[in-house]
Amino acid sequence: MVRPRFTKLPLEQQQAILQAALDEFAAHGFHDASLNRVIDTAGISKGSMYYYFDGKEDLYAYLVRTELAGLFARVGTLPELDIGDADAFWAVLEDYYLQLMRALTASPQLAALLRGWAAASKNPAFQAAQGDIEQASLHWIEQALTAGQRVGAVRDDLPSSLLIAVVMGMGQAMDIWLMSQQPGEDTLPGLVSDLISMIRGAVSA
Amino acid sequence: MVRPRFTKLPLEQQQAILQAALDEFAAHGFHDASLNRVIDTAGISKGSMYYYFDGKEDLYAYLVRTELAGLFARVGTLPELDIGDADAFWAVLEDYYLQLMRALTASPQLAALLRGWAAASKNPAFQAAQGDIEQASLHWIEQALTAGQRVGAVRDDLPSSLLIAVVMGMGQAMDIWLMSQQPGEDTLPGLVSDLISMIRGAVSA
DNA sequence: GCTCGCCTTAGACCATTAGTCTAAACCGGC
DNA sequence: GCCGGTTTAGACTAATGGTCTAAGGCGAGC
């Protein structure tokens, strides 16, 4: 866990460290990122780094959490899902997903960070570090799915763990594909609509 | 690329090396596997290992390729897909997928190996090593999808790269979920049927 | 039977990694 | 001015993947 002392640092030094970490992790992914390089770039000593963070995984988890929080703060929270019928459910979801993707295309570094996260998250040895991030994401999808089941938009004849796993798999594949397309503001809505329609087809009642 | 000299080795020594590598990679995944441990376990020297293989990625790629070839040899090749209508297409695919999963549950080490492969394959820095494996897999899915489009079982209004990416993402998620369930011979067919129905829903015309 | 030359092997060595630890520097309170 | 806890510097460790050189092994030609 990140040490509280880190948050007591002058903001500019916090940002210097986080920026260096973001550059490094976004450029190389978790495994191939060098903590030593982050330390050099940030201009602090190894002792200080380990005084602020438990280690590489801790820094990474904190960075992802912080950046994700910023992203969701920019986009806003997910609107209420279980008012209305199935069509309304999917429309709301599509709109929200579109806004998320807009925000993501605007910050390619964050996209790279999440791409690396998606790649690593399946590795069991890494899940310990993923911890609350993964949990939050799963929780988010789980809530959306159960809301969809309440309004009859999502089938409920399968184990929810399977639905969650498949939706996450689809979502990650779509995110990566979408980022690789570098979609413009004109094409993005249509693509997002297609993606949601595929998810809808997969999990519809 | 694996050096031809490796295949000229006595079979038992080849198998000693491959078995050691399989144990290590299946237990720890690609990144956390230690090549030095493989070398020790196999009872060869570092010089020999690097005389047979270009390096860690090369050994891993060769191992996956070999094991995959064995799996497909056990299961047999995919039956002809574009005879009949859409329902026939999905029935054939389901049956084949079921056989693959049967074979996979029978060899948990191979399942672990492929799980690690799935986790690593999204990392761009790693794709160079994936190379022909990834290509073969993509090619396989691509062929199935175009066959499905010919018989009207698969929509053709989306970029095929998107369809491929999404189907791969779903497939990987499903494989991982399925392996984590440790399904018995009684439950497996029903689960596989559910999985195929989700893919069908996602990509149907 | 001997020797030459090439294929193979052994393992020391290198740069780099994440992470540990100790000693010094700093700085506020008295 | 100095005392004591907080913070920093960076040497150090164990392990990694990968390189390289020198020796061993062994068969062909004579």
Image (spheres, coloured by chain):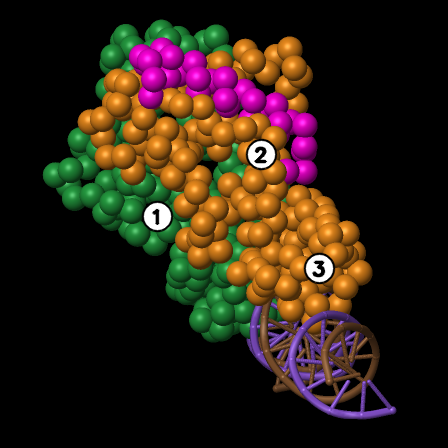
Chain colours: A orange, B green, C brown, D purple
Q: Give residue B44's position: percent from left, percent from top.
A: 51, 71
- For this rendering, which residue is in front, D4 or A97? D4
Q: Where is residue B60 drawn, in percent x and y?
A: 51, 52
**Identity, as a three-letter code, of the amino acid under mark 1:** Ala
Badge 2 marks a residue whose secondary structure is helix
Give me the C-alpha separation between circle 2 and circle 3.
23 Å
Would residue A175 be found to the left or right of residue B70 on screen?
A: right
Q: Is residue A171 visible?
A: yes
Front position in the image: A176 or A132: A132
| Identity, as a three-letter code, of the amino acid under mark 2 | Ala
- Pinpoint the chain carrying mark 2: A
Tag 1 subunit: B
Mark 3 and mark 1, same subunit? no
Queried whether the magenta region covers residue A163, the answer comes back as no
Residues in magenta, as a range: A82-110
Q: Main secondary structure of the magenta part?
A: helix
Residue wearing tag 3: A9
Q: Which mark is residue A73?
A: 2
Q: Are marks 2 and 3 in contact (CB under 8 Å)?
A: no
Marked residue nearer the N-terminal end (2 or 3): 3
Q: Residue at x 64, y 53 (%)?
A: A32
Q: Is residue A87 within the magenta segment?
A: yes
Helix, strand or loop status at disc 1: helix
Q: Which residue is mark 1?
A: B111
Write the residue at 48% across / 14% down: A194
Image height of B88 relative to B12, above or below: above
